[in-house]
Image (cartoon, coloured by chain):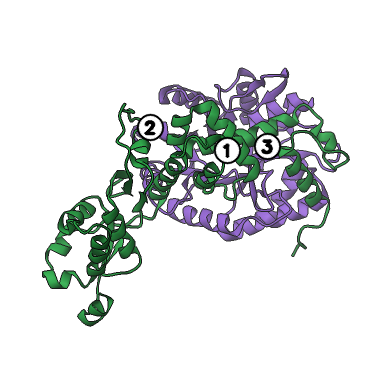
Chain colours: A green, B purple
Amino acid sequence: MIPPVAGSLARFQDAFARALLAPEAEPASSVSALAAQPAFAVYRNTVMKGCIDALQANYPAVARLVGEEWFRAAAAIYVRESLPADPTLLRYGAAFPDFLARFEPAAELPYLPGVARLDRLWTEAHAAPDETALDPAALAALAPDALAGVIVRPHAAARWVWFEEAPIYTIWSRNRPDSTPDADIDWRPEGALLARPRDTVEWRALDAAGCAFLDACAAGGTLGRAAQAALEMRADADITQLMSTLLASGAFGQLTFINRQSAEDQI
Amino acid sequence: MTTVPSAGLGLKPQHFDAALACPAAGLWFEVHPENYLVAGGPRLAWLEAIRARHPVSLHGVALSLAADAEPDPGHLGRLGELVNRIEPVLVSEHLAWSTWRGAYHPDLLPFPRTGEALLRITDNISRTQDALRRRISIENPSHYLKIESHAWGEIDYLAELARRTGCSLLLDVNNVYVSARNLGYSTEEYIDAFPGALVAEVHLAGHSRDPNLGESLLIDSHDAPVSPEVWALYERLIRRIGPRPTLIERDDKLPDFATLFAERQRAEALMRVPLAEAA
């Protein structure tokens, strides 16, 4: 066994890593002579560019909304705060939506953190485990009273979110790659559902009742409990229509039956 | 990449359909495993579809073998899962570091080639080979900085790592050219001194001039065709050591598949010359 970091290699790497992000070389470290060579900029540039490129790839709707120059300047500040913890750069930038929420130059774009959150949910849905989406026929075969006692887990790739403040979903979906921004946006609260019913991520708007329904399913509640949660959110929610939309979107994964007594206890 | 060494291509998502359909005999593909360390979804499905038609090599950039720390167990575990899933013909990594104290720096960073580092890297290669249950290949990186505190030359260092761990070597001819030009040594001497018996794979790529420093600093940018100088060094190498699985690497300013395939065919043709002469 080799003892943990103590020797000159560790000291070299501490100083080199600091110099990579420092605006100028620090005095009298074991790498100060290296950092003074013009070629040191190659490493500085490559590390910074690699991180910023990854953020731009992971947050395409944000980048499109603010423009490349603004995005890369903001991303450079984020990189200095928070280098990747994982070499799979697809996962880099989990804290970027929160960063944008407290990033002063973004204050006049209050919808930006929400758009970033949807970009992030897209990435999560994209890389989630494979799972067969629940076949609607599996539910159609059940008697209505049995249906209420069934537990259906959301699909491994399903992500949903409700935005009370702004039409984030519309702004986001019109700024994804290959989409065209339209002129008018109806300024109202909105929710979104992202799922991977087939090969790739698909998305659609989802109302507050739908989000409450999926929240209840994710918490392990029965369909009866989820329907109740949806109706508490919107008294006029059409549960049959909602179920059919969620099934068609691939929002559900595994189905489990529980006995009637515990179903009634839950309700 | 089985009995007769052949030439392969670095594979990017833009070329997926063309790659899948390409019927060339012996064609294999190489990818960076870091882009595929996900639980599921279209990326993995894509790689598995390629793997069903062609051999695949995994060329890692992030194990950080030269850091004074063990490879990140989470990353190594995910790499192991991908290796089990894809069954690559070859797994390779670099003589460099990138992850340090939990932060990943997306580059191949240099270090002084000392005895202390040799112990650590030996240990890290062995841990990796144990975890993946296979031999890996270690690549010579590109160099930009003059480091005074090297106690070993790079070739001796790589050969000693191979002796201690049983790993093989990946010789990147473009890295040799870039490094020799940047640090001022002979490309031919380096190529001639490299231990041929240890070479499991050869990389060929393009480079560019530094935008500020010009000719005095070459960058291993993988954004251009293989240069005439690198082709000449490659020919010199395989005439001495015989054909080896050879990869055309291209990561930026991607041309169409046919253009890259033509470079692959050139490597393929050069490899057949020594075979014909020997026959």
Q: Give how far across and how far down residue B70 sits, in percent.
A: 68, 57
Q: Give how far across and how far down residue B216 sits, in percent.
A: 75, 19
Mark number displayed over residue B163: none
Q: Residue at x 16, y 54 (%)?
A: A241
Judged left or right of residue A100, residue A225 is: left
Kindly check if marks 3 and 2 are in contact, taking CB atoms under 8 A apart as contact.
no
The residue indicated by pointer 2 is: A177
Kindly check if marks 2 and 1 are in contact, taking CB atoms under 8 A apart as contact.
no
Query: Quick one: label 1, few (<14), some, or many (20+) residues within 10 Å?
Result: few
Query: From mark 2 to mark 1, how far is it between C-alphas?
Result: 26 Å
Q: Give how far across and how far down residue A223 sits, in percent.
A: 23, 67
| Identity, as a three-letter code, of the amino acid under mark 1 | Glu
The residue indicated by pointer 1 is: A104
Query: Quick one: label 3, few (<14), some, or many (20+) residues within 10 Å?
Result: many
Residue B164 shows in the view: no
| Identity, as a three-letter code, of the amino acid under mark 3 | Pro
Kindly check if marks 1 and 3 are in contact, taking CB atoms under 8 A apart as contact.
no
Label 3 in the same subunit as label 2: no
Dot 2: element = loop
Label 2 or label 1, whichever lies nearer to me, is: 1
Query: From mark 3 to mark 2, how far is it between C-alphas?
Result: 35 Å
The mark nearer the N terminus, 2 or 1, is 1
Pointer 3 chain: B
Pointer 2 chain: A
Pointer 1 chain: A
| Identity, as a three-letter code, of the amino acid under mark 2 | Pro
Q: Residue at x 75, y 48 (%)?
A: B160
Mark number displayed over residue B141: 3
